[in-house]
Image: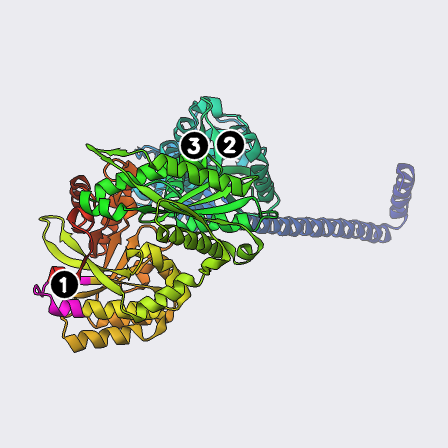
Amino acid sequence: MSPRVWSGAVQQGWADITVDPLGSLATAIAAVAVLALIAVLVLLARERAHRRSAQEALAHSRELRHRYDALQAVTREGVLVQSLAGRVLDMSGRAAAILGLEPASAVGQAITDLPVVLVNEQGLAMNPAAVLGHRTGTARAGYSVDSELVGVVRPGTAVTQARMVQVATQLVPAGDGDAAAVLTTLVDVTGRREVEAALNRSETQFRVAMENAPIGMALVDPQWRIVEANAALAELLGTSVDALRGYPMPELSQAEDRDVELREVQRLLDGELHRFSLEKRYVRADGHLVWVALDAALVRTADGRPDHFVVQVRDSTESRLQAELLTHRAMHDPLTGLANRTLLQEVLQSVLEQPGVVERVAVLACDLDGFKDINDRYGHATGDELLVHVAGVLRAATARRGTVARLGGDEFVVVVQDVDGPKAVFEVAAAVHAALREPVRVGRRRLTVCASVGIALADPETIDGGAPALLAAADAAMYRAKAAGRARTEVYDASMDVPTGGLAHELIDAFEERRLVAHYQPIVDLADGRVVGYEALVRWEHPVRGLLLPGAFLPHVQEAGLAVPLGQLVATQVVQFLARTADQTRWCSVNVSADQLGDGEFATTLLSEISRHRVAPGRLVVELTESSLVASGTRIRHELTQLSAAGVPILLDDFGTGVSPLSYLRDLPVAGVKLDMSFTSGIPDDPTAGKVARALGALARELSMVTIAEGIEHDGQAEYLHRSGWRYGQGWLYGGAQPGDSLR
């Protein structure tokens, strides 16, 4: 209503009142009532609006509180709100858990009254108000102080059990109504600190272990470059650690060895392998080569990416040389250094398998005439020197045109390979005869020895029979030379009719005629030289060639089918020898092969003979060679167990030369070991042989086994072996094998 209209209405109203005073008054009262009603309605509307606003604010406040509580439930941080005066206004559940308090009981208390013990990193107590409260002079809205690491300890507990907490404070404007408040955040870092400490400890341990490791170690990047190396690796390569950092690993190797190494590295990177090992050669800084065993493993990141390699490098030069030495000894005669029978047959067989061998290959068999007389008259040492001289003669005569071997005793064989084989082999034979005409000076003596030589030329017939046939042909020709007057050369032809099976037939006849007999070599106590037992060694009383040692005929025993019968024959003779020996404390060992053990009758026969002759337990000993037991089966193990249970001790012969002696010691009822003479022969001049002898002796003693060293030739060997822990010994120093009748 406009003022003008309102004014007119008023004037009209006064006019009406003047005319009709009572009516006008009623009208005025009604108007005022209307206006009052309108005012009341307006006020009610405003009140309802204020109430809705308050309810909405309350609901919003509850929602914010709900979100705040939910946030505090999942966050790692605890929140503590306090007034500038240091009184707790609010405390989240996480903060209460960190401080070891109840939120309801803490709210309203002063910080200094809270039952909390705070310590610094050195374990010294701290003022809670100074740590959790307001810093005077530094507080302004939005200002955060540097965080502080403190330990929270429950009252009455040790400082070592403190929970490490990261504390930070911030001034919040209008945090307490209109006044500012202090917001303190607490983060429990105990687990993280423990992880960090563990990682630091692990890294320190790894670094210390790496730096002090006796073998070379290096960390290598995915590009196969050295990141870090230890002193042992630097020393192995003759350089410094600083020089190795950043050095490419392939550059350490010889050029021809790098491709194999890089292929293995790539297989690691491709995920085909987890680690690889290689034995290879490294080039030292001074240019010398060193054999190493390289082991590498790849470490990947959490997402599978290659991170670095951990590499170990071990110097394997000595072990490789020792392995090569043992391999050499297994294939060579220990006295002369010539090839032995095994190597000779391998060489000859490989030669015969090549095309075009006819007219290029020939075999020469050489047996010394009168050697046994020299050996018996002047002793074994003199005989050995003579054999070494003959070996040199054969090497010189062959002049690198073939392989020279000693088969045993005074028997030698030469496999000649030349463009003109027949011509070359006759030249070798002539050179041998010419050289042996000259007397040999041995000590103060001048000795003369000659040789009977047999030659077999490679032809289609002998080639078909392989190496054994050609060797048998040369052997037959050599026997013809002896029968024809000795000191001469004969060439094999079919009229000699002594093929591979010739010697086998002779062996069968000798077995039936009881010309295969046991001789006994003494075994002594190395402490005082007292004879404690014997080893039975088979001999062949040959009607033409005289007394033959095992090396001359044992390789043909299997061919003749006499392996098992011969073993039973010798065992029977040994039991009879023990029964009639005057000294009933002495024992005797007999060699037994895998064929004899696997036959099934050997143990029964042997135990029957022992019972029949009433030989005391422990006096008969069975010797096993490692090589004969490589393929040992359950039957062999059963027979050995049966013998051992019946009081027959088991010895492992040729100890140290087989392929798996440790497994035999573990799996078989072995009571003792015999050191192979190839180790004894090098003592005391060969340090490697000495080390092996000491190590094998220590192993046997650790297992509480009897120890016997064979092949002792002089006092120096006996003294060394006795000092090394070997209890018994045998060899030419104490006498050779003798017939049983001469020992009773």
Range shown magenta: 576-588
Residue 607 in picture, x, y percent from top left:
23, 74
Can you tell which quarter of the image residue 576 is in?
Answer: bottom left
Quadrant occupied by the C terminus: bottom left
As helix, strand or loop, the secondary structure at mark 3 comes to strand
- Where is mark 3, residue-wise? 148
Does 621 appear above or below 456? Answer: below
Residue 154 in picture, x, y percent from top left:
32, 45
**Amino acid on which the number 1 mark rests in the picture:** Asp
Q: Are marks 1 and 3 in contact (CB under 8 Å)?
A: no
Q: Do the residues labelled 1 and 2 touch (CB within 8 Å)?
A: no
**Amino acid on which the number 2 mark rests in the picture:** Leu
Of residues 690 and 466, the one drawn nearer to the viewer in this rendering: 466
Residue 393 in picture, x, y percent from top left:
37, 36
Which residue is painted at 24% across and 68% down in the image?
571
**Amino acid on which the number 3 mark rests in the picture:** Glu
Colour scheme used in the picture? rainbow
- Where is mark 2, residue-wise? 171
Magenta span has 584?
Answer: yes
Reading the chain from its start, which is encountered first: label 1 or label 2? 2
- Where is mark 1, residue-wise? 741
Residue 281 in picture, x, y percent from top left:
48, 34
In the drawing, does residue 74 fall left or right of residue 579?
right
Q: Nearer the viewer, mark 1 or mark 2?
A: 1
